[in-house]
Amino acid sequence: MKFYQKEIQISPKKRGFYLITNEILNSFPEINQIQIGQLQVFIKHTSASLTINENADSSVRVDFESHFNKMVPENMHYFTHTYEGADDMPAHIKASLLGNSVTIPITKGSLNMGIWQGIYLCEHRDFGGARNLVLTAFGN
């Protein structure tokens, strides 16, 4: 079994949902050496998250952002963690709802996702800064 691990940094983005599949693949060519295995992508932050969803129509990402902002609004009177701004506590909640990692099968040196699937970086802060991802691929 082969194991590969790399940490990459995604450039700062404004709040929203971003396809990062190609960025991951371009940064981690070792995936090509695995015939059967898995890729785990882990984000090292508490106010951004990862998910897998629609990779073709960008309106899906816009709708995700709109819905999450309605579902977890800013400036709720019961938030006590407010010293980093109105977007901070909602960002933590959104990150917990979506999660900090995704796992994708690797088959014949490629990610084995559906034709319409892509990996999203979900930035929940207005100005969250660069985001660090740990990529771990393993298999035969």
Image (cartoon, rainbow, N blue to C red):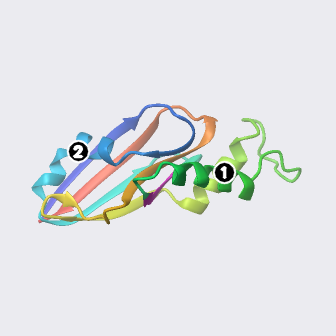
As measured in the structure, the alpha-carbon distance from the residue carrying label 1 to the one carrying label 2 is 32 Å
* Residue in the picture at 84% in, 50% down: 76
Q: Nearer the viewer, residue 56 or 139?
A: 56
Q: Is residue 135 above or below residue 52?
A: above
Instruction: Name the residue located 63 percent from the left edge and 39 percent from the top edge.
Output: 125
Task: Place residue 11 in its image quadrant.
Answer: top left
Residue 36: horizontal and vertical position, in percent? 15, 68
Which residue is drawn at the image coordinates 52% and 60% (left, top)? 99
In the rendered structure, the answer to whether residue 96 lies left or right of residue 114 reads right
Tell me: 71 left or right of 23.
Answer: right
Q: Main secondary structure of the magenta part?
A: strand
The label on residue 28 is 2
Residues drawn in magenta: 49-53
Q: Determine whether the residue tagged by mark 2 lies in a helix, strand or loop.
A: loop
Q: Amino acid at mark 1?
A: Ser
Residue highlighted by disc 1: 66
Near mark 1 (Cα within 10 A), the count class, few <14, some 14-19 or many ≥20, is few
Quadrant holding the N terminus? bottom left
Q: What amino acid type should be assigned to the residue bearing mark 2?
A: Phe
Seen at 19% across and 58% down, the residue is 110
- From the top left corner, tell me how far across and down residue 118 is, in percent: 38, 55
